[in-house]
Amino acid sequence: MSTANSGSTTTNARQTRAQSAPWRNWAGNVTARPVREVTPASVDELSAAVRAAAEDGLKVKAVGTGHSFTAAAATDGVLIRPQLLTGIRNIDREAGTVTVEAGTPLKRLNMALAREGLSLTNMGDIMEQTVSGATSTGTHGTGRESASISAQIKGLELVTADGSVLTCSEKENPEVFAAARIGIGALGIVTAITFAVEPIFLLTAREEPMAFDRVMSEFDALHAENEHFEFYWFPHTGNCSTKRNNRSAGPEAPVGKFSSFFEDEFLSNGLFQVVNSLGRAVPSTIPSIAKISSRALSARTYTDIPYKVFTSPRRVRFVEMEYAIPREALVETLRELKTMVDRSNLRVSFPVEVRTAPADDIALSTASDRDSAYIAVHMYKGTPYQSYFTAAERIFTAHEGRPHWGKVHTRDAEYFSSVYPRFGEFTALRDRLDPERLFANDYLRRVLGD
């Protein structure tokens, strides 16, 4: 079957070689033109596509929804689209796990788990990504004890460079499991993931405006007193919007329909789109807009199931850089960022997002072996971002920052080897699993070396 599939895949791909359209990511800042695209309907078909690419001397990359801002998934070879590899394979209530196909969007997983009375412990604020794309780049939310989505992985299935399928867990191929939970697509193509899950629970969210200086002075307490704390600082102002999520005994009290529409859709998406378009056209208006925007959202409290509290719609497109720094360095780093913006001619219309995560044991996790705080800077799509990101990155790297693998940065393998204690472990495993660099691209050559 492998030989037949390989030949068929190669023939079909060669017939569509000239028809391959450019691929663009969600933000529109990365474009690639693959020789061919393959949409496998099974793991066997994916394995055959990998072998066929190797026979044709082509590189292979898998791409999800394109929510990464880096070229981690870009290729001029074979682009694997996993949208047919979706759905839940198995729920093991006794073990507290769910096994899901790699192309499943987080949104579908969260809704399916909720119907089963289950939930992930923690998650990010966007759920459009596929589970494999989100975990491969280290997507995270915020948490005092609960870590990234990748840290909730209990097992995974990986198609390697020779087309074989590896099943990995703490007991089976443990050295691969230790690294592949955040693999940036460098070790193979993830085809299924087993997550730890728990009985569904309620979270009470408390959203509240707060002065920047107060957040800075009380940050340690706010972090210690809440299971999940995050905040947004609005550049050109001294204002923040804070959010505290904690488990609740109930009762359920979701956001009302009017509040949901007015704050989550009209203010956070519709009006925000308009003011960003205005700011892009007339940058001098941004500081005034920021002062108004930072006061637009009022305090509110609501209680709901996890994914309805952790996640929110993000329809305004942007480009983003995010760095993880040692948590104890957060206040100093953010004050430096604010001083830099205040003293510059920059005009920044997007708020700066701050979250936290506890240390974990994943080789390329931004929280590997250290408690971390995340600072994310954004610019509206189509707005020049280089000066702002360059200045911010200079501050972040001075604090041994680790950039998110799926967000804009300029770091290379030499830098990563100095800030990741287990970087060499990962590259050695890559040498073993993909010595010919079938899964390489320009981005991986930069961040991992060749």
Image (cartoon, rainbow, N blue to C red):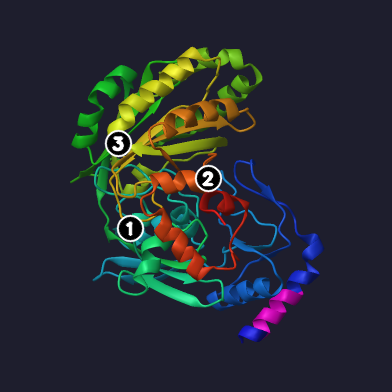
Label 1 to label 2: alpha-carbon separation: 28 Å
Q: Secondary structure at mark 1?
A: helix
Image coords of residue 303 (percent x, y): 27, 41
Residue under the image location 67 percent in, 79 percent down: 6
Label 3 to label 2: alpha-carbon separation: 23 Å
Label 1 to label 3: alpha-carbon separation: 21 Å
Q: Earlier in the sequence, mark 3 or mark 2?
A: 3
User: Label 1 amino acid?
Assistant: Gln
Q: Secondary structure at mark 3?
A: helix
* Residue 337 seen: yes
Left or right of 28 on screen, residue 352: left
Q: Determine which residue is flagged by label 1.
A: 152
Q: Which residues are magenta?
A: 4-11
Contact flag, marks 1 and 2 (Cβ < 8 Å): no
Left or right of 279 on screen, residue 116: left
Q: Determine which residue is flagged by label 2.
A: 412
Contact flag, marks 3 and 2 (Cβ < 8 Å): no
Q: Is residue 10 magenta?
A: yes
User: Label 3 amino acid?
Assistant: Arg
- Against 111, is 85 above or below? below
Q: Determine which residue is flagged by label 3.
A: 327
Write down the quadrant of residue 110 in the picture: bottom left
Image coords of residue 216 (percent x, y): 29, 23
Q: Judge the density around disc 1: few (<14), some (14-19), many (≥20) Cα neighbours within 10 Å.
A: many
Q: Which mark lies nearer to you, 3 or 2?
A: 2
Residue nearest the viewer, comparing 292 with 60? 60
User: Label 2 amino acid?
Assistant: Asp
| Rendered-image quadrant of the C terminus | bottom right
